[in-house]
Every structure is written in C-alpha cells, then in structure tokens.
Image (tube, grey):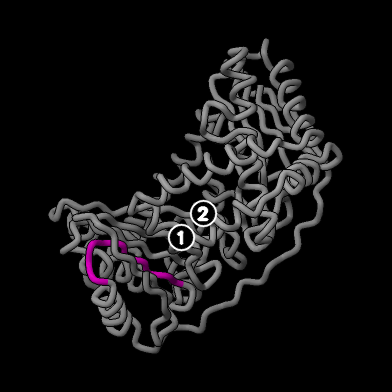
Amino acid sequence: MLIGKAPCGLGYAVKRSGNSVGYCSLTIKCGTRDEEGFHGGIAHFTEHTIFKGTARKSARVINSYLDKLGGDLNAFTTKEEIVIHSTVLKEDLGKAAGLLLELATCPIFPEDDIAIEKGVVIDEINSYKDAPADEVYDKFEEILLAGHPLGKPILGTAASVKKITRSELERFVSERFTPGNMALVMVADIDERKLEQAVLRLSEKVFDGSWAESRERTLIPVSTPAVFNKTIDKRNHEVNAVIGGLAPSLYDQEARFDAILLANIMGGPASNSKLNDLLRERNGWVYGVETSYSQYADTGVMAITLGCERANLDKCLSGVRKVIRKTQDDLLSEPAMKAAKKQLLGQLAISSDNGETQSLSMGKSLVSFGTVTSDKENREAIEAITAERLREAARTIFNPETLSTLIYL
C-alpha cells in the first residue's frame, strides 16, 4: 500500500489486491456536522444533486458512463463525510476515479433537477415514518447530542430542504469540497506505483490552484447530556427501543478499541453475542437485537437497539440490564477473552477482504488520521485489551447514571 498527498493537498492511498475488479472512492471531510451557515440537510442534498450534471457531462451521460462498462457508481452521506465510490473492471479504474473527481469539483446544479430532487429527498424523510427501527435510533442520537452539530439529522427536515437554493449548493461545494479535505483511494490488481501515478496525474489535471484553502474542523466538546427515558406512542405493532449513551471518540485510540470489542461481545452480529443469546436464542423475545458503536471526532455513541412485541418489552429491558450488570461485575476469563478477540479479528479480516469495504475504510482513515491504519496495528490494539479494561469500559459507557432510553410503542 502507498499513502501520500498530492501537491494540491489531495490525500490518496493505493493498494494492490488480487482481483479483476477495481474499487475507488472519494471521501470528502464534510458531513452534516459541517452545515453551519447553511440550511439543514445540505450535505446530503449536495450528494444527491452532484449527479445531475457537471461542466462536461449531462446527468444522462453520468448515469450511463460506468453502466456501459459494467460498473456501478454510488454515494452516501454521514454526519462527518460525503463519500462517492465506484466498482469497475480494473482496466476502467482510471475512468471511474476521474468521474468521482469531476462530480465533486464541477457540478452545475440545474434548477429543474434541484426542484425534482427536493421531492425525492422529502419523500425519503417521510419514508422514515414507515421505518420505526431506523427512526428511533436517529431520534435517540438527536436527543442525546442535542445542541451539538452531531445532533442534527443527516437528511435535514422537509422545511429546511425546501429552502436550499442553487447558489447555496455552489457555495457549499466551493467552501467545503477542497482538495485538502478529500481522499482518493484505489484498490485493484495493478502495480501500486502505476496507481499512484494515475492519482497524481488526475489531481494535477483537476486541481489548478484556484481552490479555496481547506478549513480545519474544530472539535467541539460534548457535555454529558441529561439522562432521558422517553416513551413515544407510535401505535406500531412492534415496539422499538434504544438504550445507550456517550462512548469514546474516534481519536480516543485505546478506549475506542475497548468499546469495539465490548460492543461485539454484548451485541455483535454473531449469534453467540450475549444479548442475542439471551433475548433471541434462549427466549425468543426479539427478532433481532444489536449493540452499535458510532465513532465520531468529538465523541462516540454506544447503543443497544431491539424490536419486540409489547408483551415482551419489560422482559427485554430486564434482560438488557442483566447483561450490562454482568459485564460490569465479572471479569472475562482468559479463554473467553481469547475467543472474543479471535472472533472480532476474524470478522474484521473477512470484512477487509472485500475490496469495496477496504476502499471505504481507507478513505475514512485518511481524512480522519491522515494515514491508513494497517491490519497489523489493528490486531495489536485488539490483542492488547485486557479483561480489566473491558470491564472498566462497560462500567463507564453503561453507567446507570448516564444511560438513556427511547422507546417507540
């Protein structure tokens, strides 16, 4: 793997992988949290509308450009990044990377398409009313992080989206989509030096020195929120619940690995996770339960989410509290710690074997840390976790005095 920075400030990473398929991603350090001075939801709306035409390609050409090559093109917005990514045959990787940079640097935002896309995004916002399992978690974070930029909804609101203008979109891109805030990643079975040369040629062609200086993101302390226990009657058939609180930030290096392992043990994807074993496998109270850990620059959020019938809610909440207490009170044995670490490392290895996942992960790491953390470094960080550290993480993150609950009935 080669990691570097082009003269314009564009970060890049290229990696050789034994596959006929090539993957590339452009990660822009600009998400919902960076919308100050703009209408809410503009980051996500920008992600939608950059596909509506550039100075050189119409929307129709953009939509078919990679389709004709058998590839695909996609994008998503988070609270901290906008990501455009593509999968193509390796011989077409240069074309795909060039298109990603073109979309980010010279969109034209046609007025007619802006109006149409507003309807699409507002429909997306309204669709959450039919997806309570998704809505309840977003609402939980919104309440937990109220008053902080991370507490704003990614999609914005119907009212805020309606107010977004073409000139505002142009200003947002001009101010936020700067080369120093971007990372281009390529993963393919191509010599890494050739991939690096391709990146440098593209950056020289696209960035001519007329771009605005990159803005440094200011981290904002997150105060301990007031504990809330809210129940909202949605008149749904299934009850959806979230129990959680603040957790280590992306930059709290040691503590975040403790939190990653803790989340995996308590409610990871495997059927032997503690919550899944108790609530689903042994008792059949839920269809699904998971523990998620969202890592942001200023803080993190760890939450247990579940859906169940109303009659099982009290049993589920009692079961969750039981698992939390046990994790806080008991030290895992050495064999149990070894097994938990091996399971997590196996999951990470399988995930990182996917070229698209690699590309997206490398881009996130580049814009966050300025480098890409190696598999060896991640393994060493996980292997260094002790049972004592894990128990302390459980006591801190799931402290009853700071734990909040949101329930949709």
Disc on res. 78: 2
The answer to whether residue 107 of the structure is visible from this angle is: no
The residue most toward the right is: 401
Q: Is residue 23 left or right of residue 321?
A: left
Using the image, determine if residue 253 lies above or below residue 182. Answer: above
Q: Residues within 10 Å of mark 1 (few under 14, many from 20)?
A: many
Q: Position of residue 219 (x, y in %)?
A: 68, 68
Mostly what secondary structure, the magenta segment?
Answer: strand
- The three-letter code of the residue at mark 2 reads Thr
The answer to whether residue 195 of the structure is visible from this angle is: yes
Q: Position of residue 314 (x, y in %)?
A: 74, 17
Q: Is residue 189 magenta?
A: yes
Q: Nearer the viewer, residue 108 or 299?
A: 299
Magenta span: 182-191
Q: Looking at the rendering, in which quadrant would you find the C terminus?
A: top right
The residue most toward the front is: 335
Q: What residue is rendered at 47% in x and 47% in y? A: 348
Q: Is residue 213 left or right of residue 110?
A: right
Q: Quadrant of residue 12?
A: bottom left
Q: Are marks 2 and 1 in contact (CB under 8 Å)?
A: yes
